[in-house]
Image (cartoon, rainbow, N blue to C red):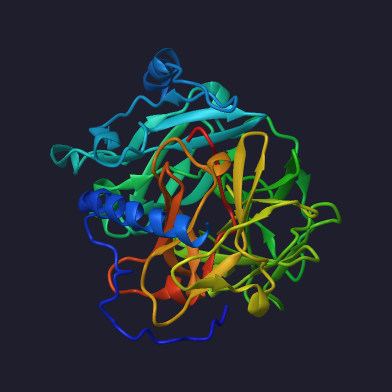
Amino acid sequence: MNVVSRKPADSTAALAAPRCRRARPVLLAAAAAAASALTLLAAGPGAASAATDRAASAQPTVAGVPWHKLTLLNHWRSDQKFFNSGDPAWAIHDGVVYLRGVMDQSPRGFSASNTFAVLPKAARPARKLYLTVDADGVYGDLVIYPTGVMDVSSAAPLEAKSFTSLDGISFPASPTTGHTLTLLNGWQSGQQFGTGNPAFWQKNGVVYLLGSLRAPSGFSSKNFAVLPPGAHPARVLYINTEGYGGAPERITIGTNGAMTVLSSQGDNFTSLAAISFPAAPTTGHKLTLINGWQSSQSQYGTGDPGYWVSNGIVHLVGSLNQNPSDFDAQFAVLPTAARPAHELVLPTYTNEGAFGYVIILPAGQIYVLNLGSDTSAKLYTSLANIAYPVSS
């Protein structure tokens, strides 16, 4: 995706995120209080599996979505006390599994396994899932096996071990009856990686993609499939996903259902796991943008930034950019009906596929950032593929 570059006036913008996020909640809380006031004024494996099954203790239910704590293994531990993120947990709602929470691995366990938990039988996928997560502000690689084993890693190992967010991860539980996609232009199934064939599944007005794909050398087009009528998005979607060897990959889905891989890594492997979006028509609610943030709809046909709540699940939609002279990372305040119970950290697509992350606070303040001095989020941020239960 070629988004017109607009150089910020100050390279030391407040948009920059600290390398270690341990200080972030305090800074954001202070900024959130001020921004909220301004907004109001302006707006007027086996044994481990068995242990996990026995230890899945239910937490309070909100909007009909009960959460169950994950039993963390290999020195992995909850970061709830640092971020009010909720303990790492899982939930099943209408046949869809949701994950939440932030964790790290104790320094004494940094050389230990990347396996952090085992999902109980009810919450396991039918096939292997390759997913992208936030690992201390960069791409993290989450793999979920049909056995329930979950591993997380990153290119620089200490990134994932220092901070990994499970927020926003969702996938259909096994068994799932999906509809196989007809692949075009030489694209082939990536099922040899254990992911199953490329497919889609629909539930409660939401489309879920499944499987993975690859292309042989000399393929003619990056367009790999077309979704059938009834499974098209209302607007164009730009989404980050997992590529070959854990490299970042990006795809776009048009309003005509055409799906395209945007970068070259797709030659080898592109995961479709954990990609979901509301099918058109969707009646959403526009967000009131603040701090110089504005809709990118007119440039990219993505729709205005907004949200849609269905059956206790919040879906964000649209895209945005920020005026070059503004640097506040907060772009809106979500209404009560769309606010999570804990602080969420969710990965997202920013300019040309750069890794960005959205932070949502329980009071509704919503931010988008990149790591360090990267200002890709200011140039373009997609809210597509961000979804979470309001009880998260």
The image quadrant of residue 374 is: bottom left
Q: Is residue 308 visible?
A: yes
The image quadrant of residue 166 is: top left
Q: Residue furthest left?
A: 108
Position of residue 96 in the picture relative to residue 325 (left or right)? right
> Observer-nearest residue: 167 or 178?
167
Position of residue 334 in the picture relative to residue 174 (left or right)? left
Q: Residue furthest right?
A: 229
Q: Residue furthest top?
A: 54
Position of residue 58 in the picture relative to residue 309 (left or right)? left
Residue 349 percent coordinates (x, y): 50, 65
> Observer-nearest residue: 16 or 363?
363
> Which residue is rendered at x = 32% and y = 29% of the image?
72
Residue 334 percent coordinates (x, y): 52, 50
> Which residue is rendered at x = 29% and y = 42% of the image?
83
Could you tell me which quadrant the N terminus lies in? bottom right
> Which residue is rendered at x = 77% and y = 48% of the image?
180
Residue 154 percent coordinates (x, y): 33, 55
> Which residue is rendered at x = 48% and y = 39% of the image?
340
Instruction: Tell me how many marks there are.
Output: 0
114 versus 68 height, above or below: below
Residue 124 percent coordinates (x, y): 55, 30
Q: Is residue 243 visible?
A: no
